[in-house]
Image: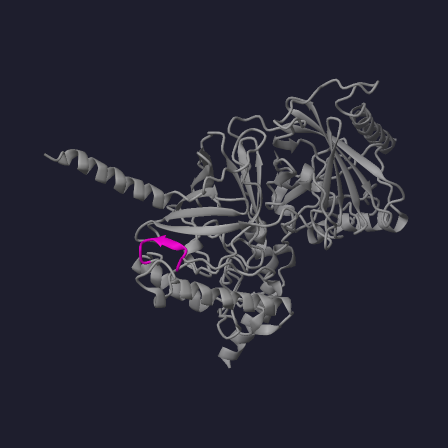
């Protein structure tokens, strides 16, 4: 007689094993170096260099992975674009977005600021968002409308006062949520570890996170970047961040980045090789999302000599007076 | 007669301030006894370096004025109008009153007295630069980059009235300042030159015994040293020395070289204090949004503070 209870137990164990395998990054037996005080060493300059879109494009609906043929085609495309950039090609070929695709008419201004020095990496993932299964950010109906409004406004205005440009144009920040993978103009992140702290210096907007890993409680003071606390789970740094200030009343280019008092982030940093990190972020905020969502993001460690530079955005914000001057001209035209 | 006594008292007070400053400033280089031997040995990090980790803050009036100064009612003062009317009742000495721009601040807008942090007391300006420093002081409210939330530069970031945190990595040391979220990366490894001038400088560090020595170069000419209008050019080079004096003190010393502005190098020195509160953390002071009304309020179609056309 078969011991069904035993078989059932095995099946459950196998199912859990599969689940865990799906959740744990594959390190292939590679163990990260250690800091002198024995923590896994994540130090260096890291950057998202893949070509995977955040949300799954409609053409890939229903599947999480590209076919081998699609991967090969994308690789060819990226190689060609990289070669064009290296050859000093101008205009559309320089930017990752062509002028035609850009929401900003004539992308030349932005292209000037953007760093496209290295070819993008091709992965099989069809979206960075891996949960929900459809690869889309689960906005609430209200948030979907707010995001459509934000997209329509971005780069178009109207700009009646300094409150109207988006937070990036105001040199404030683009938020924590996308910090590790966004920013073609300054998406580099330097991680520095000191005993009891992991510090992340993000080039764009001088964004900075000083994350205690010494077991302390986060303060209750609400901040733009919330209050982060971290712990090690094996070789994975797990960072939990809450106590964000509400800035949903500001303009955000896309609203998934905006902080509110109910935003909560859980991030997992796992080095999977000498130059690769599996970064996952789970975003929860009933003010914007119908449910929590998770993105799985491959990031790359740049060569040791890579430096990040001073991003003096506010100090040289010529865009602000120029936008407002344009806003006054537009308003005068409307009156005529 | 009485006026003469007042002048004498003022001079004596000034001498006392400078003398008091001299007592601290002229003591031997921190962490060392007069014969040069170490009197305090800093604890070590796991890789054997002196441990400077922690949240630190200056507790002085250097950000008001690096030099010794008496208290006064405001940073911006204007001469009072002469008395009119009764002949013979003109003021014996001119009176200066707070600029109307800052009058509403009352005692909050006053300048506390301070002994100064300049070794020797004097900032050796070239004559043209001494005149410009005076002009900067008068135009403080229009010119001081601190008011606009611009990155404060070095050494000013150290003695702003905000804490900063030293985070010692293995080949980089981060100094994170609360004000404006300004950050410096001290390169303890070999790096190339800065590709451009900067607000916070390009910092290369090394250990000299127990002292962290940082050579800071590649500044722009847009930062100041204090609210008194002390300034520099893009030829500025700052050599900083951070030394642990005790469990909860650092001595900070910065030597300033700028041949375009000064006749010789000069040095400031001050103690820095550990913020010993349990769970003290560096908080945000993202002041860009605090100054947008000031900087851009008059440029829009409407001023959001009033809802009216500017």
Q: Where is residue B125 in the image (x, y as percent from the top left)?
A: 86, 45
Evaluate whether residue A160 shows in this view: no
- Residue at figure coordinates x 61%, y 40% from the top left: B176
Q: How many marks?
A: 0
Residue B194 in the image: state x and y as whole percent. 73, 51
Left/right of residue A322 with respect to residue B141 in the rendered view: left
Side (left or right) of A168 relative to A64: right
Q: Residue B21: percent from the left, percent from the top?
A: 79, 28
Residue found at x 72% / y 55%: B195
Question: Is residue A190 visible from the viewing direction of this image?
Answer: yes
At x 71%, y 46%, the residue is: B191
The residue closer to the viewer here, A23 or A163, is A23
The residue furthest bottom is: A336
Relative side of A45 to B3, left or right: left
A170 vs A12, nearest the viewer: A12
Q: Is residue B57 above or below residue B102?
A: above
* Residue A107 spot, x, y in % from top left: 56, 71
* Screen quadrant of the N terminus of chain B: top right
- Find residue B57 and report its image quarter: top right
Q: Give the range drawn in magenta.
A: A125-134
> Relative to the observer, which residue lies in front, A84 or B195?
A84
């Amino acid at each position: 007689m078969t011991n069904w209870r035993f078989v059932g137990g095995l099946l459950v164990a196998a199912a859990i094993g599969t689940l865990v395998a799906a959740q744990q990054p594959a390190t292939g037996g590679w163990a990260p170096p250690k800091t002198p005080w024995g923590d896994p060493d994540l130090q260096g300059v890291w950057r998202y260099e893949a070509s995977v879109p955040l949300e799954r494009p409609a053409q890939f609906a229903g599947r999480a992975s590209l076919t081998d043929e699609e991967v090969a085609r994308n690789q060819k495309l990226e190689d060609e674009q990289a070669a064009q950039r290296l050859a000093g090609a101008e205009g559309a070929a320089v930017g990752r977005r062509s002028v035609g695709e850009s929401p900003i008419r004539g992308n030349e201004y932005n292209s000037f600021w953007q760093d496209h020095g290295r070819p993008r990496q091709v992965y099989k993932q069809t979206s960075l968002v891996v949960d929900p299964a459809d690869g889309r950010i689960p906005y609430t109906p209200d948030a979907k409308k707010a995001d459509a409004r934000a997209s329509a406004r971005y780069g178009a205005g109207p700009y009646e006062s300094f409150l109207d440009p988006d937070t990036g144009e105001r040199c404030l920040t683009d938020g924590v949520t996308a910090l590790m993978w966004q920013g073609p103009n300054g998406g580099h992140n330097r991680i520095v570890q000191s005993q009891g702290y992991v510090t992340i210096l993000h080039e764009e907007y001088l964004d900075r996170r000083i994350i205690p890993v010494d077991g302390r409680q986060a303060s209750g003071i609400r901040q733009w970047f919330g209050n982060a606390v971290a712990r090690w789970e094996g070789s994975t740094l797990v960072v939990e961040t809450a106590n964000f200030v509400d800035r949903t009343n500001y303009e955000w280019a896309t609203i998934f980045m905006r902080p509110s008092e109910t935003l909560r982030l859980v991030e997992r940093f796992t080095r999977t090789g000498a130059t690769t990190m599996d970064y996952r972020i789970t975003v929860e905020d009933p003010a914007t999302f119908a449910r929590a969502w998770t993105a799985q993001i491959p990031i790359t460690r740049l060569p040791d000599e890579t430096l990040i530079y001073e991003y003096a955005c506010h100090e040289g914000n010529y865009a602000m007076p120029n936008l407002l001057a344009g806003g006054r001209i537009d308003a005068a035209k409307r009156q005529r | 007669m009485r006026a003469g006594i007042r002048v004498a008292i003022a001079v004596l007070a000034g001498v006392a301030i400078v003398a008091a400053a001299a007592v601290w400033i002229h003591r031997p280089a921190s962490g060392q006894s007069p014969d040069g031997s170490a009197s305090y040995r800093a604890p070590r990090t796991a890789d054997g370096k002196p441990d400077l980790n922690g949240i630190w803050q200056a507790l002085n009036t250097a950000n008001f004025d690096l030099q010794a100064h008496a208290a006064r009612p405001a940073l911006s003062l204007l001469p009072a109008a002469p008395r009119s009317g009764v002949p013979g009742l003109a003021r014996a000495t001119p009176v200066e009153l707070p600029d109307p721009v800052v009058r509403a601040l009352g005692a909050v807008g006053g300048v506390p007295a301070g002994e100064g942090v300049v070794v020797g007391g004097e900032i050796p300006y070239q004559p043209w630069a001494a005149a410009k420093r005076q002009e900067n002081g008068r135009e403080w409210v229009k010119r001081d980059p601190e008011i606009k939330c611009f990155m404060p530069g070095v050494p000013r970031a150290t003695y702003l009235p905000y804490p900063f945190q030293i985070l010692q990595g293995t080949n980089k040391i981060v100094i994170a300042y609360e004000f404006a979220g300004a950050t410096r990366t001290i390169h303890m490894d070999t790096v190339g030159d800065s590709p451009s001038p900067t607000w916070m400088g390009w910092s290369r560090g090394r250990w000299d015994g127990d002292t962290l020595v940082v050579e800071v170069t590649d500044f722009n000419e847009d930062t100041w040293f204090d609210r008194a209008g002390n300034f520099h050019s893009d030829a500025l080079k700052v050599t900083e020395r951070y030394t642990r004096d005790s469990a909860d003190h650092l001595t900070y010393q910065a030597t300033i070289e700028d041949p375009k502005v000064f006749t010789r190098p000069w040095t400031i020195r001050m103690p820095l204090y550990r913020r010993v509160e349990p769970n003290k953390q560096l908080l945000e002071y993202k002041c860009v949004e605090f100054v947008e009304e000031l900087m851009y309020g008059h440029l829009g179609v409407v001023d959001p503070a009033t809802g009216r056309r500017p």
